[in-house]
Each structure stands twice: as C-alpha cells, then as structure tokens.
Amino acid sequence: MYLGRIVAIGMTPAGKAAAMYRVSSRSFPNREAVLIGGQVAILPRAGFESDLRKNPYISYNCIRIAGEWAVATNGSQTDPIVEKIAMGIPPRDAISLGLLAMDYEKDSLDTPRIVAVVSNKKPVGYLGIIRKDALLVREFPLVPGEVRYLSTYEKNTPSQHQVTTGFDGVCAECAASYIVNGGIFADFTNPVTSAAAVADGDGFELAVKVL
C-alpha cells in the first residue's frame, strides 16, 4: 500500500518518547534526510537540485525541537509550529494554528500537511493533519512499545486504530529504521528516507536513514 509521507509518535520499551518521519514518494524519490545542527531537513540528493524547480514543496525542515517538544512534519509547517510552541502556546493549539495558516499544499494532488509532536517530559503525543476537506488534531497517550501513525494518503485521519505494537527501538537510529521496515511500516511502499527524534534526558537524540 502506498501512503505517501508518514509521521508517527511512539514510545520505546524504556519509556522514551519518539517522533518519526518517513518520506515515501513515487514522483520525487531522489531526496535524503540530513542532520543540520539540532534539526533535520529533507533535501534533494546531489545532482537532483533541479527537482526544486518542478515542485517547491519537496525540501523543508522535517524535525525541529522546541524545549521539551519534538516536532516532525512533511513540510514548511514545521517552522511556524515550532515557533508557536517556543512562545508558550500549547502543542494542540500550535499545531492547529500552524496548519490553518499554511493550509494543504497547492500541488497537483492537494497534498495534506501532517504533524507529529511528542514531549520528553510527558507520556503524550499529538497527530495533526490539514486536508482540503478537514483540519484534525488529536492527542494520544504514549504506551511503551506502541507507535501511532498518520499519512498524507489512505491513512489520513488521526485514529486510535492506526497503531502498531512491538516497537523495540532503543535509540533514534532504531526509530528511523523502524518507520521504514519495522512492524506494519514494512508493508508500505516506496520508502525514500526517514528521520526520528527520541527523548534523551532533557533533550532529544536525532537520527536519519538514507535508503
């Protein structure tokens, strides 16, 4: 099954919150997640920079940190959501405001914008989406070994039923791999690259996976 881009929230068996992001793409597969300082960006691979002239939505910051919160998204909504959280706006409201301001992507597919947010202090996470027909944000409890996910296509409603168990990752690199080939994610097609943030003390460990 092809789901497009995927965000996920989960918790390691040791109780560390994780936010994950995966690029799955049929149109623009020549991209990679790159660690740049304390954040992760999605960029065209060397030699494919001209893809940006075909679609300006394919390059963006996909993971950033705002205090106790890690934010993972599939587009340029990452930055305004992080800024709002840093200002003290609650994550649910920051997600809603950021998505409403940015709206869905105005490409040929009306691609939704999706968001995942977790805390390194509370066992709670958020999944949000803005589609052409809806804006939805939902809070979920985080449970050790579980991962909840949301995608741009098919699985594009925050739902208690979009969950996979058996998440045994212990680090950010493990989480970035899991959203590509672990659990139910192994059944989803066209993976390109992924990234993850896993709680680590008062901060987050970041990692990327390039396929």
Image: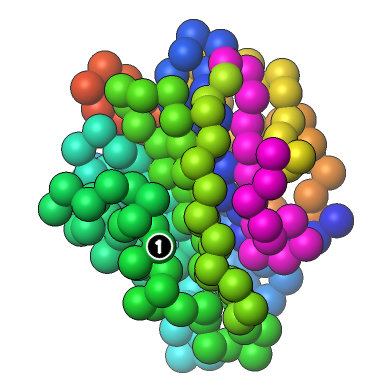
The answer to whether 52 appears left or right of 61 in the picture is right
- Return the x and y of residue 67 as percentages of the image width and height: 20, 38
> Which quadrant holds residue 81?
bottom left
Q: How many marks?
A: 1
Residue at position x 33%, y 48% in the image? 91
Q: Is residue 64 above or below residue 44?
A: above
- Return the x and y of residue 56 as percentages of the image width and height: 45, 83
The answer to whether 176 appears left or right of 199 in the picture is right
The extreme left residue here reads: 87
Q: Residues within 10 Å of mark 1 (few under 14, many from 20)?
A: some
Query: Is 159 part of what is drawn in magenta?
Result: yes
Q: Is residue 28 visible?
A: yes
Q: Is residue 50 visible?
A: no
Q: How is the image coloured?
A: rainbow
Quarter holding the N terminus is bottom right
Residue at position x 30%, y 38% in the image? 69
The magenta region covers 144-160
> Which quadrant holds residue 151?
bottom right
Is the stretch drawn in magenta largely helix, strand or loop? loop
Name which residue type carries label 1: Ser
- Return the x and y of residue 171 as percentages of the image width and height: 46, 21
Q: Secondary structure at mark 1?
A: helix
Q: Is residue 137 above or below residue 49?
A: above
Residue at position x 68%, y 46% in the image? 159
Residue at position x 68%, y 76% in the image? 27
39 or 53, which is in the foreground? 39
Query: Is 204 part of what is drawn in magenta?
Result: no
Q: Is residue 204 above or below residue 45?
A: above
The extreme top residue here reads: 14
Q: Which residue is mark 1?
A: 96
